[in-house]
Image (cartoon, coloured by chain):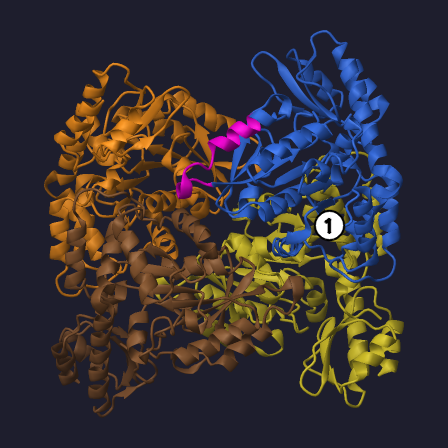
Chain colours: A orange, B brown, C blue, D yellow
Amino acid sequence: MHFASDNCSGVAPQIMAAMVRANEGQAPGYGNDPLTSRLTAQIREVFDAPEAEIALVPTGTAANALSLAVLAAPWSAIFAHELAHITRDECGAPEFFTHGAKLVPVPGAHGRMSPDALRAVIAAHGTGGVHSVQRGAVSLTNVTEAGTVYTAAETAALCAVAREFGLPVHLDGARFANAVVATGASPADLSWRAGVDILSLGGTKNGCMGVEAVVLFNPSRAWEFQLRRKRSGHLLSKHRFLAAQMSAWLENGLWLDLAAHANSMAARLAAGLTAKPGVSLRGPVEANLMFTTWESGLHDRLRTAGASYYSEDGAGYEGARLVTGWSTTPDDVDRFLALI
Amino acid sequence: MHFASDNCSGVAPQIMAAMVRANEGQAPGYGNDPLTSRLTAQIREVFDAPEAEIALVPTGTAANALSLAVLAAPWSAIFAHELAHITRDECGAPEFFTHGAKLVPVPGAHGRMSPDALRAVIAAHGTGGVHSVQRGAVSLTNVTEAGTVYTAAETAALCAVAREFGLPVHLDGARFANAVVATGASPADLSWRAGVDILSLGGTKNGCMGVEAVVLFNPSRAWEFQLRRKRSGHLLSKHRFLAAQMSAWLENGLWLDLAAHANSMAARLAAGLTAKPGVSLRGPVEANLMFTTWESGLHDRLRTAGASYYSEDGAGYEGARLVTGWSTTPDDVDRFLALI
Amino acid sequence: MHFASDNCSGVAPQIMAAMVRANEGQAPGYGNDPLTSRLTAQIREVFDAPEAEIALVPTGTAANALSLAVLAAPWSAIFAHELAHITRDECGAPEFFTHGAKLVPVPGAHGRMSPDALRAVIAAHGTGGVHSVQRGAVSLTNVTEAGTVYTAAETAALCAVAREFGLPVHLDGARFANAVVATGASPADLSWRAGVDILSLGGTKNGCMGVEAVVLFNPSRAWEFQLRRKRSGHLLSKHRFLAAQMSAWLENGLWLDLAAHANSMAARLAAGLTAKPGVSLRGPVEANLMFTTWESGLHDRLRTAGASYYSEDGAGYEGARLVTGWSTTPDDVDRFLALI
Amino acid sequence: MHFASDNCSGVAPQIMAAMVRANEGQAPGYGNDPLTSRLTAQIREVFDAPEAEIALVPTGTAANALSLAVLAAPWSAIFAHELAHITRDECGAPEFFTHGAKLVPVPGAHGRMSPDALRAVIAAHGTGGVHSVQRGAVSLTNVTEAGTVYTAAETAALCAVAREFGLPVHLDGARFANAVVATGASPADLSWRAGVDILSLGGTKNGCMGVEAVVLFNPSRAWEFQLRRKRSGHLLSKHRFLAAQMSAWLENGLWLDLAAHANSMAARLAAGLTAKPGVSLRGPVEANLMFTTWESGLHDRLRTAGASYYSEDGAGYEGARLVTGWSTTPDDVDRFLALI
């Protein structure tokens, strides 16, 4: 009953098998191997983006921070939801990689920004000439940190606001697969066709061991990206093992199958919780994570029984963040529900 | 016949098996798992250093640059051999992680610094009061980039020079296992007992998939190290797979067996090359890499036959860097020699 | 009728005379001159702080950003009012000098933070372990950007909140002289006795040509400060001219006389504005700047008549920021009022 | 008898008078004043460069480091003479402002690089693909740190080497006026017509109080420069006093008169020293500074008599750096010589 994070799951068996297969003989390092070339072709095909450049890194934080560094100058503002992972959960990685850009929080219920809210915040910044930080970039997250999703149309509307100000758009897609499944949109419609310039495509949370692909739909800064990746220690020498993971993940739609399973486990969990008296969900459950509140005292019982999750308590109630993953079983869910 | 780098080898079978075994069920992320705890205990035991703090990262560049960042201020000089990996092969990673420290090259034949040369360079820097960068740290490399090694006594002599100036010492041990085998010294004698404060202990080049352990013999800055690691995107969520690799690598002395094999393949190769007319080694072969020169024209023949390596040609001759690894076979060596 | 900024005023005649006097013969550079020594003694006496270390820089932005850089690590949060100069008006200088610290805004009416608001914001940050930026420092501003002041007791209460979390305190005193006059507190009571660790003591806005003194009440990081000052290009070679300005400024209480004049001109202006129908002040006027609103159309008339100031218009009204300085005359004020 | 530095001199009387004159009434801050506009026109005329953009800063270190920051990426190498001020005397300011670029020393006698030496060093760097820092920029110094000068033709030859590699060129002209006088070249021939992209034009060492003009002959990055200047705290609010200094300095060729005087005092000193037995000059004296050696014991006598200078002693001899300035008198020189 691990609901702490989708990264508590291990590696999907098809992916582990691919890694074992990749371990044959010797291969050139640093991405100059056939598996990396193959993966590049796969990603371009999945996204219908034959010009896109791809770079693999081992963590989502690296993917996000490197992406922002090629989009935003050190003296610029990056606009993102106030709950965004880049704002709250990366120990200042964007500031480090961008050499000091400022993350400006955009409010919005359930982890989502509205176009109007985004426009208002952007408009209020960068108006002081040389005295203020300049408008730099917009960063979206889909699935959001609150477990909601943006549809392709909603993504396009937010990108359109960025374009009003001439700003490029980054998309943190640590759970992009779950968003694709949740919205039914194509990967292209949910990214570059909506106006996204650069995507952190997350594999780790959804069945890989540790790999994220940065997809540069606009390849003009791909060489700079590679230099920044090397300079930050994120160019892995035995690169074939990164490529093998993600290649197997994409193969035959495995990534979507894994995400669909995680989403369905979340739906099962949400349905069960909703039926419980004294338990409420703090927002819509659209992908594979949710936030709940219940009366105090339940944490003890659940944890004693072996459940793990992050608690977010408030005055007079207990709160929990519950995340399902590719390896969550119906039995996990049902046993958890039975304890409540 | 891959002699380009020890990172062209794959993953040793015992290590891959351990990774597969680690993929059971779910586990807490970010190093809060039992495998990581076990590895920490193993490293402390191998180094006879019960107080040491350990941090795992996916690349040697990250290990080195993070280590230097906790030792050296942004306004300081880091003294290292002019051929050091940190100086030539990391695209400025030390400058990035330290926020601008200056790498000052120390000359020396065959990749080695002498204590006198190190002392002379340190003494010549940092004498300008507030106008000059301050003396910050010394970084050693063992095995050196030229394929030579420092004995424990030589390491201690260099660390003693650092101590004359009050400077801490980092040791880039991307091939530390090969140095341990080559010198016969204990891991402790070759590191903290000689005066090393922080060690980049390399697993990747010697049979792992992608893991380096930073060993902080002085644990006072361990928390800062962890923050810097997270902030630079080097804290992997599915951390158990890093720990599993290195744990298996250390288990039953596998790391030293793999290194001993690589070193012996290098000795076999060196012996064969020495016997060839027109071929000369550019320095002593003490571990698992060497530099050779031979008459022009040989590159073509070797590469046509399937050999791979880096060339370093000069006026009127061809040069090669030849590296052996844990997976190099006697047959690889003999076929290569037969072509010359 | 210049009400745009107190930095539109020139140099007070006593200060210009001192600069001319300082221009005799030759003198050692970089602060090793007698005038700098004398100024150090003066500041220590004015602040009753014989241990304090002093460093002069040419701008308030440099004073603030360097101060924050010695207090706050790159991975830390700096808590400051949402209108603070460091947050809005320095083009990211704090982020540049600190190598990426995050400025966290604290809300509060009229430019002031309450202890409770400060405590709430600090408490809400830095709770994510290695994943979140760490609590770093608190930065106060007195006179605030809104023209209000903190008394000595209010300053002490805010510093006490910082101490609850073990955080050091910076005070942006670009208009510190005006705050001393407004509160009637001693310089010591308004700074280190209240708990301030480091003060940006502004001379430029109050009659100097361009000099700010950073006063390090805790001198333990004075050498680091000097290195950071040099490294950022803020160590002036002909340093005696910085010292001469500020020495004359402090001599015989000139700094307080100039500030008292500026404050009194603001009071005169505020009184006059309050008496005008259709004009309102947006907050208390406690020092030498104020914010007003009036009906649309007035800007044109005032500017045609030669008045200068920054406008801050809203829907259906015009707004203005009006700042008085040491050289503002009663006639300036009265002519301005007569136009309304 | 101050020969320590040309910054030990004060402010030339014409310049101080202009500063006093500038102190009339109020003026807009941050460079939006008539004196700054006038100075911009003057510099464009002096350099025959009507498109050039100008930015004033208070120190040479700021001028150099900001210039390099707009020319060179963080992951690049800046090629400069091994004695360059940016390399040895700025406490790592270029590394700070560029976010970690690497200064690569070019050897050469008497502070000068030859085109061949420059070409060889550039060619040896940046050859490692993504693993090595990239070639970024060339920085020249004229007058050099050794007191020699580059002619316009020599400057052009060095810039041509930079162009072979597609690199932009910065010129540290802290003593540019002395170089103009020494070579007889026009300011344009000694800068942009030779291929210089950006010039640090030094006023401070040559009679100003503290002002350097950065001249961007290629104005395409002028806005970025302004942002970097503000962000580093180098945009002075009472900007008219910077402009007034440099405007008076350029007026009627005062800058060249002051430099000619300094150079002639150096020639007088060099001639006198050459005539002394046991005294030798360590290089040609072409502008206003020189390096000498003499037998041990002389330092004591000279300093007791009131002479000041930097000593650079070696084994068995004493050495001195002697610098003349606009305020050095023939009597200073002759009294100094008489002591030897």
Left of D227 or right of it: where is A325?
Answer: left
Report x, y in % for residue C269: 78, 19
Q: Which quadrant holds the N terminus of chain B?
A: bottom left
Q: Which residues are magenta?
A: C117-133
Residue A118 in sight:
yes
**Hey, which quadrant is residue C200 in on the image?**
top right
Q: Is residue A254 magenta?
A: no
Between residue A59 and residue C332, name the one nearer to us: A59
- The residue lying at 42 percent from left, 57 percent from top is B66
| Residue for badge 1 | C54
The quadrant of the rendering that contains the C terminus of chain B is bottom left
Residue D32, visible in the rendered structure: no
The chain ID associated with circle 1 is C
Horizontal side of residue B267 vs D275, given as left or right: left
- Amino acid type for the residue under numbered disc 1: Ile
Residue C119: say if magenta: yes
Secondary element type, mark 1: strand
Q: Main secondary structure of the magenta part?
A: helix
Q: Is residue D70 left or right of residue B17?
A: right
**Quick check: C196 above or below B49?**
above
Say which of A123 and B212 sits in front.
B212
